[in-house]
Amino acid sequence: MTTPHQPHTDGIGTWSAVPEEPTLKFLKSININNQVLVYENGRYYNAWFEFEPSEGGWFWTDEADSEPNPSHYMPLPKPPSTTQSQIGDTDNV
């Protein structure tokens, strides 16, 4: 069972704790400016980490431009592959 301060771990991948200061290993693991799945106080959402000198350096952002502060992150899974026969097939929806 998860608590409000711990991400659920069943299913998709492995959670990594967000370090206090961005390390080179961290920056490589999140593929700068690519979305990742993040966890913050019981919420899961997509976010990305970017560098903006006018904002003081590195920071998290999301689609709401809310500058979140997640505790954990993981790469998003690859999108499902579709075959030509699946395109337009509403039975698979």
Image (cartoon, helix red, strand yellow):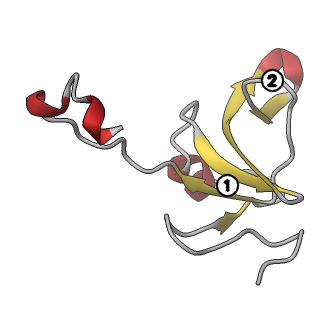
Name the residue carrying label 1. Answer: 23
Residue 51 in the image: state x and y as whole percent.
71, 28
Cα separation between marks 2 and 1: 26 Å
Q: Is residue 58 above or below residue 72?
A: above
Check residue 45 in the rendering and tell me which mark sits there, or answer none. none
Which structural element holds mark 1? loop
Image quarter (top left, top right, bottom left or bottom right) of the N terminus: bottom right
Instruction: List the residue tagged with mark 2.
Output: 64
Question: 10 Å neighbourhood of mark 2: few (<14), some, or many (≥20)?
Answer: few
- Determine which quarter of the picture holds residue 55: top right
Q: Position of residue 57 (x, y in %)?
A: 80, 30
Percent position (x, y) of residue 16?
Answer: 64, 66
Q: Disc 2 vs disc 1: which is toward the camera? A: 2
State which quadrant residue 15 falls in: bottom right
Q: Position of residue 82 (x, y in %)?
A: 21, 36
Query: Which one is in front, 91 or 80?
Result: 91
Is residue 88 placed above or below 57 in the rendered structure?
A: above
Q: Residue at x 85, y 60 (%)?
A: 42
Identify which residue is drawn at 36% across, 41% down: 79
Left or right, 92 with respect to 47, comes to left
Q: Amino acid at mark 1?
A: Thr
Label 1 Cα neighbours within 10 Å, binned few <14 / some 14-19 / many ≥20: few
Q: Locate the C terminus and report the quarter of the image it occupies.
A: top left
Front one among 46 and 81: 81
Which structural element holds mark 2?
loop
